[in-house]
Image (cartoon, coloured by chain):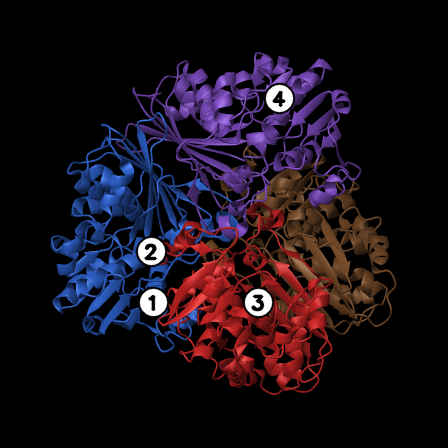
Chain colours: A brown, B red, C blue, D purple
Amino acid sequence: MIKVGIVGGTGYTGVELLRLLAQHPEVEVEAITSRSEAGMRVCDMYPNLRGHYDDLAFSEPDPQRLGACDAVFFATPHGVAHALAGELLAQGTRVIDLSADFRLRDAEVWSEWYGQPHGAPELLDEAVYGLPEMHRERIRQARLIAVPGCYPTAVQLGLLPLLEAGLIDADHIIADCKSGVTGAGRGAKVPSLLAEASESMKAYGASGHRHLPEIRQGLGDAADRPVGLTFVPHLTPMIRGIHATLYGRLTTEPGDLQALFEQRFADESFVDVMPSGSHPETRSVKGANVCRLAVHRPAGSDTVVVLSVIDNLVKGASGQAVQNLNLMFGFTEDAGLAAPALMP
Amino acid sequence: MIKVGIVGGTGYTGVELLRLLAQHPEVEVEAITSRSEAGMRVCDMYPNLRGHYDDLAFSEPDPQRLGACDAVFFATPHGVAHALAGELLAQGTRVIDLSADFRLRDAEVWSEWYGQPHGAPELLDEAVYGLPEMHRERIRQARLIAVPGCYPTAVQLGLLPLLEAGLIDADHIIADCKSGVTGAGRGAKVPSLLAEASESMKAYGASGHRHLPEIRQGLGDAADRPVGLTFVPHLTPMIRGIHATLYGRLTTEPGDLQALFEQRFADESFVDVMPSGSHPETRSVKGANVCRLAVHRPAGSDTVVVLSVIDNLVKGASGQAVQNLNLMFGFTEDAGLAAPALMP
Amino acid sequence: MIKVGIVGGTGYTGVELLRLLAQHPEVEVEAITSRSEAGMRVCDMYPNLRGHYDDLAFSEPDPQRLGACDAVFFATPHGVAHALAGELLAQGTRVIDLSADFRLRDAEVWSEWYGQPHGAPELLDEAVYGLPEMHRERIRQARLIAVPGCYPTAVQLGLLPLLEAGLIDADHIIADCKSGVTGAGRGAKVPSLLAEASESMKAYGASGHRHLPEIRQGLGDAADRPVGLTFVPHLTPMIRGIHATLYGRLTTEPGDLQALFEQRFADESFVDVMPSGSHPETRSVKGANVCRLAVHRPAGSDTVVVLSVIDNLVKGASGQAVQNLNLMFGFTEDAGLAAPALMP
Amino acid sequence: MIKVGIVGGTGYTGVELLRLLAQHPEVEVEAITSRSEAGMRVCDMYPNLRGHYDDLAFSEPDPQRLGACDAVFFATPHGVAHALAGELLAQGTRVIDLSADFRLRDAEVWSEWYGQPHGAPELLDEAVYGLPEMHRERIRQARLIAVPGCYPTAVQLGLLPLLEAGLIDADHIIADCKSGVTGAGRGAKVPSLLAEASESMKAYGASGHRHLPEIRQGLGDAADRPVGLTFVPHLTPMIRGIHATLYGRLTTEPGDLQALFEQRFADESFVDVMPSGSHPETRSVKGANVCRLAVHRPAGSDTVVVLSVIDNLVKGASGQAVQNLNLMFGFTEDAGLAAPALMP
């Protein structure tokens, strides 16, 4: 058993870590921090955890107590991991950051999109982008993981095969993404009210969203050249789930696209290439650490369409974080992540 | 007061016609037909109509009784209007067909997509495609109207300004569309159950959907040349609403896109160009005969993004049908259509 | 045309007043106030109103401008109408208060439940409880109306026939009520988020809720004696609607309950007694100023069950307020209130 | 490892059994039957099971193959278990029936409510009602289990303490119950469509529902006398969950109700008595085999209110079935049932 800490545990990715770790055979949660809720038992905020963590309470963040953990998850707004990660790493604690703090390799690009200076540029070199389907071996050796964002996970997994094979015009990729409302976090904001967000659909950030540079960086790695991407996220009236619909223009006759996708992910236990002709539903991954993909080529068209679904809180955040932990500590990759999705 | 009939009144577009016509000062509903429910009062099936149509019952379709109406709406599956429209026109009754029967000018293309011979090719010449923002003057004179489909309405209104101005690559247009479940009709099908369709998002028909040729025809008219279109519809967990997200690659520096859109629709009372930077929500048109649009150009990109929302049952079907009726009979264009959307 | 003002227009009852008054032939909205949003156009906050009130903006509350109106609606938290109503009445303006300020005849009871002194006890004598089905004649003469709460409307209408006829044990009435989330207002609170409130059901205030004394007062009027009531409200994952399920133990053989209900409401255009055996759905009144009722007597039981549904924002608030206005100014009672519910 | 079969696996309780058993360390699913879908892989119908049961396909029911299992679950409409249970028991296979076939001890009462003769009255004597909180010891020895219905589970667990202690008037109990739509099954029926059932609330069966005699029987056992019950179920726009609101009139001063409930369930790992003043949410048990309870006594009232929530598909069906299996085979009672609820 290893000991882990969670910094910033009151949000949705924090409680989701607790839910997943409750089923993990090798992990014990030693501390979970929250300045605003210090002293409150986690199961008083999240009654689904009653009977699972009855003695665990939120505590003030204490670098020494956290430093005594084998690993610490950051489930915090951006900027927090910048401030604490170095101190933890110095104590030998591995850091798995679910925030955006270490996702972009270029501190200046980060600073542009997040409107503040990068707080720990000296750590960028050793931070590993925690998408196991791209960087599994580096993750095994890493001390500091930047867990990919939810949209970036869905988009990259869907486009990797096409870009790696050089089949599509990398200058004009379109990612039309639909997310459930937990993507907007647990903040009390009017637009996230049930009375405002249900029975409706809308785009947001159509002119530019923070996940754009992250996706571009990852797709650029896959293509081995800079890519041009139009990314439009949408708010969908559901709790969990991301559906990414990806459009690329073929620059060459691609051969058997279904086979290409199946081969690319043949050894990946958390990427499921559905049968030809499928339309994956987000509910088929609800609560599960899975990305399901389907690839379509409409008749008479040179545009390929990829459908990619994940649970934004699992493969798009906390589940992927646990998957990274498993790789870093040599556990079986699906420890704590084996349960099927909840459907219906 | 004119007298109207409705053929096939048990579906969602049928009851929506009744709801709208209840507020119409110039129209009386003389007959509503349904083979399966003949004899049942409409308000026993649709209790929202109690107090409005207490004496109106579904009846067997009777060409003579329908032929005594000034106008007849078809709210039927495809094929039905083919069989009856000619007979009604011969009696001097105008026909407003909400089905797909007369939307495609080419009977062979229709036959390909609908899997059966076209049943009334001799009427195609005089059928007018009922999109007032394109064909208002022809509608005023028409005897036979093909009311546009829901997706086609949202997509065409969003792309008209760009195509008419020749600003985008007409060979590679992308329409990513999201629809509420009433778009699938009132049929009892497992995938439309609340337990199956809520808390989920999925694409369907990614390899080809019947609205594709209709949209292509309309966009081709606007562009004055054939267009290439990738159209992917998605099922969204809400009752009403379509959100079309439209992507076009600019082939020339476009000037002020906001002004272009505002000018194109300056005289249109049912198309609302939102302020620059807006993201229209489908709920803002719930129950109302309005299309709200916003146009975005992401920084550093040559792709323009148009957001277009309608209520699929109103501007996407029954409301547009009433708008056509108003034009055909010289009523004010918003008669029966003046109520604001229901929000929240 | 009369001129009306709305105080506190940013909440759901405020925008709902605007939606309904947009269809009212005799009313012009002169002013709508909001301290927090002064200067903002109403259609920028509520885009469903674009095209309807394009020049109307929220303004600071100005007693003189409001006093120049024929009538002023208060769509405010409790306490606000206390402070302003007297001044408006003195200027000859009639006041229709949608808040709880004048619903309880006893200032001390009010003070107990609302945790502050009653701010205008001198006005209580002339305040009329605006339930037209109980007090129509007094409403016609009133200068100050206390519009009933949403739960109280649904519960009272469902129980009036039984209590007036003295058929049930008035000491042990049970009202199990389910409300959509707009009942909790437009405040940004975590429990009202879509991610928290959807896909779930819960009771609240089971040990005591502010609508309890109001309901008891109204039922006591109907029974002509004090009543004992257990009232448990529940939060339901929908935007609009209240479903009240009412249980009374028969103290005598009641005869034909269906006929009793039909006769009681025979002249009421906004109360719809459904056929025997019906189960009214809240969606059948969505957006409409109607209460639909059904009365059941389970086999072998001495308990009568009444099902009562309203739209909490319409018959439970803004629609009932307009109905009161119509009575006070001699308009037809359904002016602005004639549209059928939106279904589906 | 034991081998189990599932008869009638295409419905929601069937797939839920598969989801739970995928996490069960002692159970292997040997066969799952469906006449209509024989030959189809379960993961083609339920893609959440992809990667879990990739080789399992629905098969025609074969009594020999089923008889080779250690236990067989019936997830079937009523009547099916009547026909097959005896044959399986004769082969030494234990039967766990999720349908209503063996819930009522009196074959005549069963016949009255289900409109057909009881098909296996000779088995009624040995059938054990599978509510572990009432009958744990008998379940351990049983060969044939009647798994309680969903409403009966929620209602009985909430009322047991009060009835066993003789504190409330057993002649006038009220159970107002709200259920998600999976309670209506996976049948393709118009009223269960998302477009019909969402954004709405309604009662059904207000004059009599098949769960009534089952609840009365169970409550009668607890009270040791016949009880009088008014039971009104409601359809709620959510996928899973039952919220039972239970009303009983105190016949004596009850002492500390909170302590009474806590003591009654002190040893029950699947019944969670929440802290005093709580209002349990159905989402807090989504996917989990838990019943959460709260007990309230409104001020100044002699009526006690119990709030009881379960997931209708888990503690209300398939989870409870697995709990019974665990007891029958001597596994730990929470084997396969230990995961926390999915929240949000």
Q: Is residue D307 left or right of residue D56?
A: left
Specify the quadrant that holds the N terminus of chain B: bottom left
Residue at 74%, 44% in the rendered image: D44
At mark 2, the secondary structure is: loop
Which residue lies under the disc numbered 4? D82
Labels 1, 4: front one: 4
* Kind of residue sitting beneath label 4: His
Q: Which residue is mark 2?
A: B51
Query: For this view, does A15 lie left or right of residue C289?
Result: right
Mark 3 vs mark 1: give the one in front. Answer: 3
**Residue depicted at 53% across the width and 63% down the height:** B75
- Pointer 2 local density, CA inside 10 Å: few below 14, some 14–19, many at least 20: some
**Tag 2: residue type?**
Gly
Q: Is residue B343 visible?
A: no
Q: Is residue B249 above or below residue C319?
A: below
Q: Identify the amino acid type marked 1.
A: Leu
Numbered tag placed on residue A313 in the rendering: none
